[in-house]
Amino acid sequence: MRALIQRVTDARVVVDGETIGEIGPGLLILVCAMQGDTAAQSAKLAAKISKLRIFTDDAGKMNLSLTDTGGSALIVSQFTLAGDTSRGNRPGFSTAARPDEGRALYEQFIGDVTALGITTQTGSFGADMKVRLTNDGPVTLWLDV
């Protein structure tokens, strides 16, 4: 699985003019299931993200995790993270999981993050979403598991 995470002071997802998910301080997690991904990879990605020490402590050092800070997660499906731009000018998405598999792994990932005690909000799989955020730092990381 692949994720792009952004440390945020706030973030929200809007579909058809309606906010469907919104958080304060925490992480915006854009997640993509790739062909061949498994539930075990979902659990590994969730655990890794929850423990990443990317929040600042009292000394101003990135030394705290999402779990340490009690921050929230806004999880948004984004198959375009599978985009291959190595040839031509139009990205190819053949490495992304099929929609039914992608949806199942997206829902698995949400469950895995929630099971770690993290307050979670979500986007809507397959919807045309508008994501609004205030990136804190900015801190943005790419993860593959």
Image (cartoon, rainbow, N blue to C red):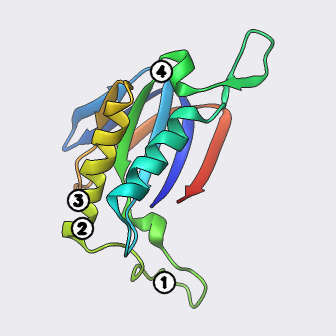
Q: Amino acid at mark 3?
A: Arg
Is disc 2 in contact with disc 1, using a CB cutoff of under 8 Å? no
> Closest to the observer: 46 or 122?
46
Horizontal side of 140 relative to 82 (left or right) equals right
Residue pointed to by mark 1? 90
Is disc 1 in contact with disc 3, using a CB cutoff of under 8 Å? no
Please tell me the numbered disc located at residue 103: 3
Horizontal side of 36 relative to 125 (left or right) equals right
The earlier-in-sequence mark between 4 and 1 is 4
Expressed as whole percent of the image width and height from the top left, the position of residue 60 reads 78, 17
Q: Amino acid at mark 2?
A: Glu
Q: CA distance from mark 4 to mark 1?
A: 37 Å
Expressed as whole percent of the image width and height from the top left, the position of residue 134 reads 53, 30
At x 30%, y 32%, the residue is 121
Please tell me the numbered disc located at residue 71: 4
Q: Amino acid at mark 1?
A: Arg
Expressed as whole percent of the image width and height from the top left, the position of residue 101 reads 24, 67
